[in-house]
Image (spheres, helix red, strand yellow):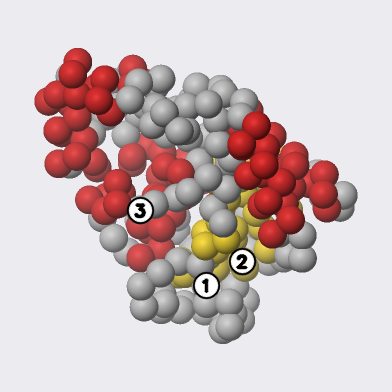
Amino acid sequence: MPAAGWSWALRCITDPRPGGRALLLARHGRTAWTGEGRYQGRSDLPLSPEGWADAAGLAAALAGETLAAIYTSPLLRARQTAGCIAARRGDLAVLVDHRLAEIAFGDWEGRTQAEIRAATPEALRRWKRDPGGMRFPGGETLAEARARLHAFLADLPARGGAVLAVTHAGMIRLACLDAEGCGDDGFRGIRIAPCAVRRFFLGGAAAAPPPSHHETVE
C-alpha cells in the first residue's frame, strides 16, 4: 500500500487537483543490455549511444516543464539521463537518492530470460506465477523495493512544484500498481519504454484515475 499520509492517483493534466503535487517518474535511456533483454538491476552500466539519444530526446520533451527538483537513482545510467535533463535546463541540480535504485535482481543480473529458463526453470515459473511472492536469488522482493519507493515519497515536501525522479522500469511499475490500487500480479504486464515518463499526482484531493492509461512522454 502507499506510504501513510499520501493520497495516490494518476494525475489528469487537464484537471489538476488542489493541493496536489505533480510527480514525474522517468526511466533512464538504453544501455548495451537493453536491446539484449538482459536483467540489469543493480549492475552499473552506462548509457549506450542510443541511450544518450534517448536522454537528449527526453530533455527536449521536458524543457517546458516547471520543476522544483530533479532526483535520480545512484546507478550510472540514471545519473547520466538526469544529468542530460539538468544540463539542458541549467536551473536545477540533480539530487541522488539511493532509494530510487532498480530492484535488485541478484543472480539474474546480466542474464536473459532464455538463459534463466535453461538454468533454473522453476524459479522463472515462480516469478511469472507469483511475482509478489518471489525473492530474486541473491536479490530482493517487490515488497522491499516498494518500501524504498514509499520511503522516498514520504520524504518529499508536501508542497512545492513538480518533482522529476529518474529511476528504473521496475520502480515505475510499482508506482503504477500503487496508483491503480492493483496487486503485484500485473507487474510484468506494464510496459515502460526507455526514457518514458509516467506522471502522477501526490497529496491533495483524491482523484479517480483516467479510464485506462497513464500519461506517457516518450
How many other residues sit within 10 Å of disc 2, few (<14), some (14-19) or many (≥20)?
many
Residue pictured at 62% horizontal, 26% vertical: 46
| Residue 207, percent from left and from top | 45, 79
Tags 2 and 3 touching, CB below 8 Å: no
Q: Which of 51 and 85 is in front in this view?
A: 51
Q: Which of marks 2 and 3 is nearer the N terminus?
A: 2
| Residue 85, percent from left and from top | 74, 47
Could you tell me which secondary element the residue under label 3 belongs to?
loop
Residue picked out by circle 2:
22
| Mark-to-mark CA distance, 2 and 3 | 21 Å
Under mark 1, the amino acid is Arg
Could you tell me which secondary element the residue under label 2 belongs to?
strand
Q: Residue 136 carries which label?
A: none
| Mark-to-mark CA distance, 2 and 1 | 7 Å
Q: Nearer the viewer, residue 121 or 145?
A: 121
Tags 2 and 1 touching, CB below 8 Å: yes
| Residue 100 in view of the camera | no
| Residue 90, percent from left and from top | 87, 49
Residue picked out by circle 3:
190
Closer to the camera: disc 1 or disc 3? 3
Q: Relative to 171, is 218 on the left or the right? A: right
| Residue 193, percent from left and from top | 48, 49
Image quarter (top left, top right, bottom left or bottom right) of the N terminus: bottom left
Q: Which mark is residue 11?
A: 1
Q: Earlier in the sequence, mark 1 or mark 3?
A: 1
**157 to 151, vertically: above or below:** below
How many other residues sit within 10 Å of disc 3, few (<14), some (14-19) or many (≥20)?
some
Q: Earlier in the sequence, mark 2 or mark 1?
A: 1
Furthest residue toward bottom: 15
